Amino acid sequence: MDEPKFDVVDTRRRFLSWFVPPAGVFVLGLVALLFAGHVPGPLQPITVVRGMLASKRDFFEDEQVKRLLMSHGYQVQITPAGSFELAETADLDSYQFVFPSGQAAADRVRERRRGKHAVAYKPFFTPLVLATFRDYAQALVNARVAEPRGTGDTPLYYSVDMGKLMALVAGKGRWRDYDAKLSANRLLVQSPDPCRSYSGAAYVGLVAFARYAQPAATEAEAVEQARGIKPMLDAEGQHSDDMAPKYFVPEGRSFATVAVIYEHQYLAYQNRRLDNGLGLDTDRVLMYPGAQHQTAPDFISFSPEGDAIGSLLMTDPALRRRAVELGFHVYSADTAQFDFAGYLAQRRIPEPATATSDTETWLPRDAEFRRMVDEIGDCRW
């Protein structure tokens, strides 16, 4: 009879047989994420950079942008504010950068930072537009105020004569006057609060330029022009900070029949739909004023950390590519990957009508512009 055999189990070998396969998968996954830029390198310190941002905070709130910045060792902590609110904030020095949406607010920031660190970067630009719905745009075509741009039965873009549009607003025209199927509501444009939002203030300048054909040269002239257009703007009622959230909700045509927004907000919305497999929204359309206003926001750094973020926005290929994907026109588009029109063609989004004419809306100089806006909105600056 054979003696019983006892096998001695090596517990270390058994442990390794259990542990090594999942650990290998984890390591391979981590390496893949590192190369994709989704996580920072091992033990890489993260620098938190504080910034106050207006509407361009959309860019920094994007999850891909956050991951890309994190891969460089930076996390941006955002404080939201309207552009003019940002320019006048009492604790400006507690931030490492600010990102107002327009030139007037940026000029005020530089004035307050005179003699201190203030380095400006211009990473991208976007036009100011009027967003509406196809049947309302067609009503304005019927009124000979707007005309479609491009070919096809469902154009996404229209040009609009601001002088004629404001004449309809001043004359208290109603939508059903130009399309019997529409409501009897008064024909109005809804714009953001001009005292807080650059888009609201720029719209004031747009209306004034359409009415008077030249920017105010003195503060007295600014007051005169503001009083001339004030009834058309007062008719809107109470202003909000940003019209885009109201326009893009399912009930948008009730909240914001014609809304002042930025082009990039519309293109980002269309891109999100495509990403979700929904297709283009052909009911929502944009109208471009004949005399356009391009907003070229200044990223203004107050510190070396802010300089690092500004430099990345200007030079990092992945961040610049993401800016195009979010609807922005990127400066110095010197390679195909930054080609705005090419990217839209790839997604089968029609290219916007960003150059409807050679005419540009010129805003008054900072002091006169602020006086005009104050007269319109009774601002507390």
Image (tube, rainbow, N blue to C red):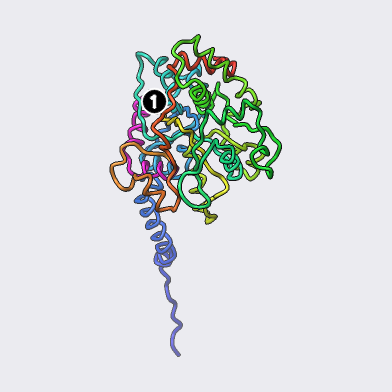
The quadrant holding residue 40 is top left
Front-lying residue, 47 or 96: 96
Mark 1 sits on what residue? 300
Q: Position of residue 78 (x, y in %)?
A: 49, 31
Magenta extent: 300-327
Assign a secondary structure to mark 1.
Answer: strand
Query: In the rendered structure, does residue 309 fall within the stretch colored magenta?
Result: yes
- Most extreme residue toward the right, as rendered? 184
Residue at 33% over, 33% down: 311
- Asked if the stretch drawn in magenta spans residue 329, the answer is no
**Front one among 342 and 38:** 342
In this rendering, the answer to whether 365 lies above or below 101 is: above
Image coords of residue 158 (percent x, y): 50, 41
The residue positioned 64% from the left and 39% from the top of the image is: 178
Instruction: Give left or right: position of 188 versus 39.
Output: right
Q: Secondary structure of the magenta portion, mostly?
A: helix
Q: Position of residue 1 (x, y in %)?
A: 45, 90
Tell me if residue 43 can be seen: no
208 or 113, nearer to the observer: 208
Instruction: Decide if residue 302 is in sight here.
Output: yes
Q: Quarter holding the C terminus?
A: top right
Q: Residue furthest top?
A: 220
Q: Residue furthest left?
A: 334
x then y, percent, for residue 307:
34, 29
- Which three-letter amino acid code belongs to the residue tagged 1? Ile
